[in-house]
Amino acid sequence: MTTAALQTVLTVPKRFRGPVGVANGGWIAGTMEEALNGGRSGSRSAVEVTLHAPTPLETELRLDHVANSVSLSHGDKLLVEAIPVAEDLEGPGFVPFNDAARAEAGFAGLRKHPFAECFACGLREPGDGLRIFPGPVEDTDLVAAGWRVPHTVSGEDGVPASIVGAVLDCITGWAHFGPGESALLGRLAVQIHGSILPGGRYSVVARPTGRDGRKLYGQSAIYEMDGTLVAAARATWIAPR
């Protein structure tokens, strides 16, 4: 990234893809959250990110800061907008790490995955992708996965918001999806409450919160081993026609 006045040039590396050829929506949302909150440590304000169009990979994009908003564009085409929201995002409910890890065996994407190359939930090599494989938690409406944080996603200041956004993203979709089913992320509100440590173990949990026609709604969270809420998200997905 290079900066000039209130403008930044952003290029998304191919590693952080979601569907083939475009960026993972959660990675983009986390990147926008960090741009709006200035990378402050500790608990931060919630940021709502709207994805207007797929974000291309390995392409110079323009990140504009205007008043209390941030936008991402490719030429004259608006791709993403982010604004602060005056609310605290709640988690769907804590699932102990061992229970969350056991739930992974029921991950629908292991049977048929629409985006097997996805950075967050795809079937990529350990250390390359995040391999968040959420499965149903018995006797609940929750899905969960155990996240063992690879050192390959940590920067100088720990795990960045872009990675946190990616973790919180796909699991809200899998709260709805069966094998082979998919939708595209339309909006993700993200709030980061604390730091995530490389090498740490966390529970990632989501639940579906409703459906309105083609719109699917969900919430997700990352919890420490003792149940402390580290980050939370609220998502809107758009199912194909």
Image (cartoon, rainbow, N blue to C red):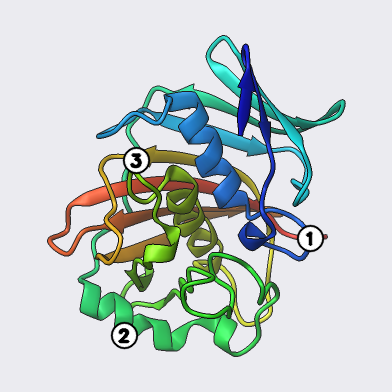
Q: Mark number for residue 102?
A: 2
Residue drawn at x 60%, y 23% is 70
Q: Which residue is mark 1?
A: 21
Q: Does 102 appear above or below 93?
A: below
Q: Earlier in the sequence, mark 1 or mark 2?
A: 1
Q: Would residue 141 appear left or right of 241 to someone viewing this image? A: left
Residue drawn at x 40%, y 61% is 206
Q: Earlier in the sequence, mark 3 or mark 2?
A: 2
Q: Which residue is mark 3?
A: 192
Q: Would residue 79 appear left or right of 169 to someone viewing this image? A: right
Residue drawn at x 36%, y 63% is 205
Mark pair 1, 2: CA separation: 32 Å
Q: Nearer the viewer, residue 193 or 12?
A: 12
Q: Residues within 10 Å of mark 2 (few under 14, many from 20)?
A: some
Where, by quadrant of the figure, is residue 207 drawn?
bottom left
Residue 82: x and y, percent?
58, 28
Q: Secondary structure at mark 2?
A: helix
Where, by quadrant of the figure, is residue 113 drawn?
bottom right
Mark pair 1, 3: CA separation: 28 Å
Q: Does 98 appear above or below 163?
A: below
Three-letter amino acid code at disc 1? Gly
Q: Mark number for residue 141?
A: none
Q: Earlier in the sequence, mark 1 or mark 3?
A: 1
Three-letter amino acid code at disc 2? Arg
Q: Does residue 229 appear in the picture of this structure? A: yes
Q: Would residue 228 appear left or right of 46 to someone viewing this image? A: left
Q: Residues within 10 Å of mark 1 (few under 14, many from 20)?
A: some
Residue 211: x and y, percent?
59, 54
